[in-house]
Structure formats: structure tokens, C-alpha cells
């Protein structure tokens, strides 16, 4: 999980503070990993090597939109309301925060590592060919 408290000025000129949360559960990471030929880590390495800023931004926003949510007060749930990302993205806090993220590659990488730590484990884990899997009664 990635958590950050950000300061912003709203559209009326009032200062504000917002705590933002990003988290992907293991199955969400698996779905993202399997949605890209070669996996998401390989894709990011390629677009970073190519210095394709537009692709980096598009993929970061895609992943962040899937990871954005609200932690329950008791810490037992991480809720992702359908309009949560849009509400954040349309607010004043998003603009300054995202601009800071894209200007700071180390911060962007830290965010991705925090919300997708399972990527490393998935790549290290042995996988079975589907033909090797047997079904039991």
C-alpha cells in the first residue's frame, strides 16, 4: 500500500490536506501482469529505456486508477468506489500531486513498488505449464 498526505489549494483558494491511498491486492496484480505480453515489469523497463514519457504516464494512470481507494477506519477493508478515482482526478489535489510524480522518477518508481510488490515474487516463482496440471475428482 502507498499512502501520502498531500497539501493543495482548492478552487476557491482555500488550503487543504488530503491523505491518498493506493493498493492492489494479489489478484489485481495478477490481472495487470497477465494483461501485458511479457508482464508489466518488462513493459515498464522497455518504455523507461525508450524514454517514452507518454506511455509511462498512460500506464501509471491506468495502474493508479485501479489502485486508488479508501482504507476503512478499522483497517480491515480497502474500498474502491466506482467514482473514487474520477473524484480525485477532478479535484485540485490530483494535479499538483501527479505533476510531482511525473517530474520525480524515483517517487514514481517507489509508488509502483509499494502498490505492486507481488510483481517481483510472481516473476521469481516457478510456473507450471497448463498441460502439467491435473484435475482430481
Image: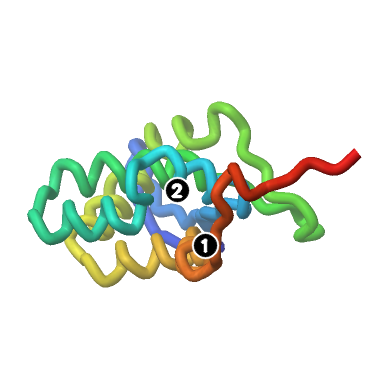
Cα distance, mark 2 to mark 1?
A: 9 Å
Location of residue 122 in the rendering, given as x and y in whole percent from the top left corner: 52, 62
Q: In which quarter of the image is residue 84?
A: top right
Q: Which of 51 and 110 is in front in this view?
A: 51
Q: Is residue 114 left or right of residue 74?
A: left
Say which residue label 1 marks: 122
Above or below 83: residue 36: below
Question: Residue 12: in sight, yes or no?
Answer: yes
Q: How crowded is mark 2: few (under 14 residues within 10 Å), some or many (20 or more)?
A: many
- Residues at discs 2 and 1 in contact (Cβ within 8 Å): yes
Q: In this view, does 116 lie to the left or right of 9?
A: right
Location of residue 86 in the rendering, given as x and y in whole percent from the top left corner: 45, 31
Q: Is residue 112 left or right of residue 132?
A: left
Question: Residue 3: in sight, yes or no?
Answer: no
Say which residue label 2 marks: 33
Above or below 93: residue 82: above
Q: Which of 51 and 81 is in front in this view?
A: 51
Its colouring scheme is rainbow
Amino acid at each position: 500500500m502507498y499512502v501520502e498526505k498531500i497539501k493543495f489549494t482548492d478552487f476557491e483558494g482555500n488550503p487543504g490536506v488530503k491523505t491518498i491511498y493506493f493498493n492492489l491486492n494479489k489478484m489485481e496484480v495478477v490481472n495487470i501482469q497477465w494483461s501485458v505480453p511479457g508482464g508489466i515489469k518488462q513493459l515498464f523497463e522497455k518504455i523507461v529505456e525508450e524514454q517514452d514519457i507518454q506511455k509511462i504516464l498512460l500506464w501509471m494512470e491506468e495502474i493508479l486508477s485501479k489502485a486508488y481507494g479508501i482504507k476503512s477506519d478499522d483497517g480491515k477493508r480497502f474500498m474502491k468506489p466506482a467514482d473514487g478515482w474520477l473524484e480525485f482526478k477532478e479535484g485540485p489535489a490530483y494535479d499538483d500531486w501527479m505533476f510531482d510524480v511525473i517530474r520525480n522518477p524515483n517517487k514514481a518508481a517507489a509508488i509502483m513498488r509499494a502498490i505492486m510488490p507481488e510483481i517481483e515474487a510472481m516473476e521469481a516463482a516457478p510456473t507450471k505449464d497448463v498441460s502439467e496440471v491435473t484435475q482430481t475428482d
